[in-house]
Amino acid sequence: MASSIGLTADAFNQLLDWLDPDRERAARSYEHIRARLIRVFTFRGCSAPEELADETIDRVAGKVAQITQGYVGDPALYFYGVAEKIYLEHSRKPSVLLPRKPLVEAKEIELKYACLEQCMERLSRQNRELILAYYAADGNSKIGLRKQLAARLGLGANALWIRAHRIRELLRKCVKQRYRRMEPDVLINFEGTQ
Amino acid sequence: MNDIQHNDSAVFRRYLLGQSNAGERSTVERRLMTDREYLDALTRAEEEMIDEYARGNLDAHEKELFESLFLNVPERREKIAFARAFNRFIARHAVASSAKEPAPLPQPVWQRIATVVALACAILLALVSGFIYRRFAQARTELAAAEVQRSASETREKAAAEQLKELEKRNQELENEIAALRQTSPSATSELFTLALTSGWTRSSESVPAANLSPAIKNLRLELAVPDESHYGRYRAQLQTVEGKILWNREPLQSQHASGREVVTITMAASGLPQSDYLVTLNGLTTGGPSEKVASYYFRVVKK
């Protein structure tokens, strides 16, 4: 379980007690809340969403003794209220929104494409065919084609997306790892051929 | 989940592009903090938007909003780079695989456990039935081996047949292209005028690319630069007057790599083009779906 840097063990334990008397469920609840705070800051376009999520947690943990006395409701929503304040504070700082970086470059796409071909080879036949069929659908025909695919596989539309999305995330992580490994030497060679 | 998608897709789109007002934004975020399915639906909408961007399907305004919010976050930049590679891969490989039905998914765990239990029972019974079982097992093994062999053989045959079909199709396309080129290509290079076009010109631009066609020019060849973000395998080109009258239409056209970029080349008779301004529209052809506009190019014909 990840805990933010500014949290003392005592405050962290108090926080977990507030989330749930059962320590295991409290730990899961903490992880869910942290993950969702990161998503909120990401959706808002913040360049360091993890840091802001941890700052939110630190702020809540610092007041947890007061909160437990008066607050009624889902703790996640309390965290969200604090997150909004943190966002407002940081949006006033000029460093929050970094200058926009250049668009993704063609050479990066080429290298990642090569990594992707290798990662695709590691998928099972079923998963490879599923992901090709699912993401090939585009435009107006997308909904109909995906319904047909879901019916063929005996899945609901949401279950089908979750399955396709998980495979895609596996591929993305595989590509990310391979790209990192190839970066130092291959990038130099690639530059040399320009 | 379907209810979430149908009711909220417009809300998600506004939210993801930073266009929600404070109330709507708060409603969305409070719900995603507490509702797993809602978070999934929003994640799905985000993934689809990244794919739209990677395929060049966002309009100019949405593209600007998207870049201002998405390119600022390292994880999202990485997702965009992946989506571009991924969509290119899908575009190149989906044609071959779309003809095949996806293989059935692996059995759920409980079914596999049930299978194991059933096998254990069968073994127990087999111990009791002794000789009869041994004969049965032997026969079954032989049958299974034959089945595996037959299945492997069928798979190989099917793959080879599909490969052959694909090659024949490609061959036919190439023959069609050659035939079309023979009909339209001039007999001598001096009779051909080549004009390279990039998208982004407007008719009001001062220096619209012009084809200066002398009477000796028989054919006009246009080299249409395909935008970097477009990764369609096949395209349709349409030539029309600026008044909207369609003069020429052709598909499927393959892009080619030339001078470090992808171009689609079309050739047409110069005699059919009086002095005027023209618009060429390039559409990407998708698998089983409608074509999608990739770029448009203005040019001018000047007769000497």
Image (spheres, coloured by chain):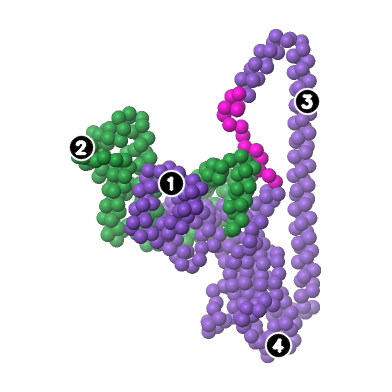
The residue under label 2 is A69
Type of amino acid at the residue the image marks with label 2? Gln
Q: Please name the amino acid that badge 4 sits on.
A: Ser
Helix, strand or loop at label 1? It is helix
The location of residue B25, given as percent across then percent down, is 36, 55
- What is the chain letter for disc 3? B
The vertical placement of A98 against B113, above or below, is below
Tell me what residue is drawn at x 58 percent, y 40 percent: A155
Q: What whole-number distance in Å separates the C-alpha atoms at marks 4 and 3? A: 77 Å
* Kind of residue sitting beneath label 1: Leu
Q: Distance between the residues labelled 2 and 1?
A: 30 Å
> Height in image: B238 above or below B55?
below
Residue A188 visible in the picture: no
User: Which numbered disc, 3 or 1, marks the residue that appears first in the sequence?
Assistant: 1
> Where are the magenta residues, as a range?
B100-114
Mark 4, residue position: B214
Q: Which mark is residue B39?
A: 1
Q: What element carries label 3?
A: helix
Q: The green chain is which one?
A: A
The residue at 34%/53% (across/down) is B26
Earlier sequence position, callout 1 versus callout 4: 1
Q: Is residue B235 above or below residue B129?
A: below
Spatial CA span between label 1 and label 4: 63 Å
Question: Which residue carries the number 3 mark?
Answer: B143
**How many numbered tags mark residues here?**
4
Dot placed on the residue nearer the N-terminal end, 4 or 3 = 3
* Residue B199, x across and y down, in percent: 57, 72
Amino acid type assigned to the residue bearing label 3 in the image: Leu
Real-space Cα separation, disc 4 to disc 2, in angstroms = 89 Å
Q: Main secondary structure of the magenta part?
A: loop
